[in-house]
Image: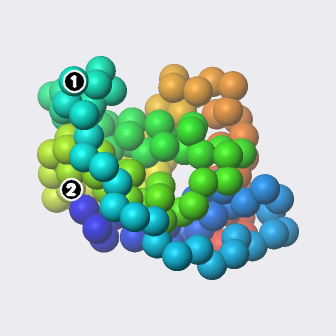
Amino acid sequence: MGRVWLRLVAGGALLLLLAPARSQLLPAVPPPPPAPPLDLADPAAKEINLCVSRFGNSGCAARLYAGLLCGAVGEGAAPQELQQRLEQQYEQAGIDFRGISAGQIEAMAVKDEAPRLCPQKSRQIQELFSSLAEASGS
């Protein structure tokens, strides 16, 4: 799980999405305190528990990542906080990352899941990821 997340972050997509302006860099921020355990009575937590059975491992990973992107676009959340939240959701969902690449998760999240989860922000997410791919020469 850690390798997939690190590859998603290494691409810099979250930093682009979280920066108020593309030219600004985020200041160094100390790691956030540990997140509280998920409340299993919460409907969102129940949905995470059923995610793999409903969407499969890669679909669930993409859906959770897209949900994080939808909430993060324009909000300026700390990357460490987002990483911790996503890792917690991946762990709770019980995703088996064998045979799944970070690129697969990212592509599914940006192209398929973001338009479903946040149609009003999906174009912005797609443009940012497109800009990132162009900047890296991919």
Please name the residue shown 20% across and 30% down the image.
Answer: 40
The quadrant of the picture occupied by the N terminus is bottom left
User: Where is residue 25 drawn, in percent x and y?
Assistant: 75, 73
Residue 59, position as x, y percentages in the image? 31, 37
Q: Judging from the image, what secondary structure is the residue with disc 1 in?
A: loop
Which residue is more in the foreground, 106 or 66?
Answer: 66
Q: CA distance from mark 1 to mark 2?
A: 26 Å
- Label 2 Cα crowd, 10 Å radius (few <14 / some 14-19 / many 20+): some
Question: Is any part of residue 48 visible from this angle?
Answer: yes
Identified at 84% across, 68% down, the residue is 23
Quadrant of res 77: bottom right
Q: Is residue 23 left or right of residue 111?
A: right
Residue 25 sits above or below residue 56 on the image: below
What amino acid is labelled 1 in the image? Ala
Residue 97's disc number = 2
Q: Nearer the viewer, mark 1 or mark 2?
A: 1
Seen in the picture, residue 4 relative to 125 is either above or below; the reply is below
What residue do we see at 21% from left, 51% from top? 91
- The reply to whether the C-beta atoms of the residues labelled 1 and 2 are less than 8 Å apart is no
Q: Is residue 133 visible?
A: no
The front one of 138 and 33 is 33
| Lower position in the chain sequence, tag 1 or tag 2 | 1
Q: Quadrant of residue 115?
A: top right
In the rendered image, the quadrant that contains the C terminus is: bottom right
The amino acid beneath tag 2 is: Phe
Q: Nearer the viewer, residue 125 or 101?
A: 125
Q: How many marks?
A: 2
Q: Label 1 crowding class (10 Å Cα cut-off): few <14, some 14-19, many 20+?
A: few
**Label for residue 121?**
none
Q: Residue at x 30, y 70 (%)?
A: 3
**Res. 41 mark:** 1
| 58 with respect to 126 (left or right) | left
